[in-house]
Image (cartoon, rainbow, N blue to C red):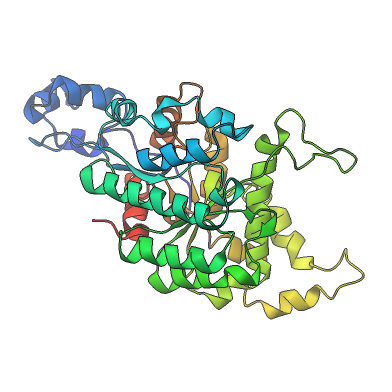
Amino acid sequence: MKLRPAPPHCSQSVAAAPRGATGAPSMAAAIAAARITRREMDGLRTGRVIAIGSHDIVRPVRKIDIFNHIYPPAYYTRLMQVAPDYKDIGKRMRNIPMLADLDVRFRVMDTFEDYQQVLSLPTPPIESIASGSGAADLARAANDGMAELVARHPDRFPGFVAALSYHDPDAAAREAERAIDDLGARGIQMFTNVRGTPISAPAYLPIFEALASRDLPIWLHPYRGADVADFKAEDRSQFEIWWTFGWPYETSAAMARLVFEGYFDRFPALKIITHHMGAMAPYFAGRVGPGWDQLGARTSDEDLPAVLRSLKKRPLDYFKMFYADTALFGAYDATVCGLAFFGAGHVLFASDAPFDPEKGPMYIRETIAIVDRLPVSNGEREQIYWRNAAALLKLS
């Protein structure tokens, strides 16, 4: 994809609009001809409108937020029974009303025109707070609850992402099949490790096979806690480095393990959405590309060049097969970097709501502002906002 300057807002419609005395298009005349409302004019000023057609009503761009988080009521009730004092990341979850209060969520959503959410659970992973039948019950409650929300509010929630407990891989695969086949989940959420075990471990192959055979995506969410130290001599991470830099590393490491262990060759239909714009991969494209083309040059006790020979493509080409979302907390330059790496056809709009300082609207608002000013065509912008999601998730 070649990045190029975006055309001015309304350039197509103004060309067809009535012209003023100087021959220049008259915006007032165009507005009058279109009979747009004050609300629609506000949308035009804020960049939420893609065109003013001659004598047509202004239409906003549809937006499908594919990575945001919610606690369905029944799941939240059980979670508070199982882990009422869950620390660190749990502390934050308990202080964000939009996670569990549907009225708060709707008020936030109503401030953004033509905005929808595909629902998923937030951290922590279920297997980190429960085990056995308790974990399986939590996963079922989450999926039943999200399916009910989608059924009750299809105009707001066009789909949901299944939650699984991965401590028992066979049970996780069965719940994935139930959630997709019986409840209509549009894919599953998988964290970057399972209690420290890489997701590329053979035990989890049936889960990847189930998703690839259904041609539905895996949402890859990073996770590690403060117990993963920043330095070998310490026993705990400091200053929340485990989150700020640790989570992007987790995602990047999980991507690399899937690449080098041949998952895309084994499952050609595999589709994985990486949270936060593919983490470190776009910025480190040089290391992922020419750097990893020399795999084994730094290792004496393993035949790593044999790994390269076993793959059908360069490592860089596999990394570009991942999908990435726009949940970058308002970072424009990082969004442009990720877009250049993955291409508009592999980038999806997401906000990571409600984990912003305002506990709901800020990341949505800032991400929309970024996507609206990206140097892409209006067609590519629509791909990012909703067309990629509709195709990938098989939405109407």
Residue 196 visible in this rendered orientation of the protein? yes
Foreground pick, 121 / 48 = 121
Q: Is residue 306 above or below residue 167?
A: below
Q: Nearer the viewer, residue 195 or 111?
A: 195
At 45% from the left edge and 41% from the top edge, which residue is drawn?
78
In the displayed structure, does residue 341 sit left or right of residue 306? left
Report if residue 154 is visible in the image: no
Q: Nearer the viewer, residue 23 or 113?
A: 113
Looking at the image, residue 340 lies above or below residue 233:
below
Picture quadrant where residue 63 is located:
top left
Residue 193 placement (x, y as % from top left): 64, 55
- Near-viewer residue (110 or 166): 166
Relative horizontal placement of residue 34, taking residue 198 as reference (left or right): left
- Please identify the quadrant where the C terminus is shown: bottom left
Q: Is residue 194 above or below residue 370?
A: below
Image coordinates for residue 173, horizontal then vertical, percent: 48, 67
Total labels drawn: 0
Give residue 93's position: percent from left, percent from top.
52, 31
Residue 356 location (% of width, % of height):
50, 27
- The residue positioned 37% from the left and 64% from the top of the image is 178
Please, is residue 177 above or below residue 157 in the view?
A: below
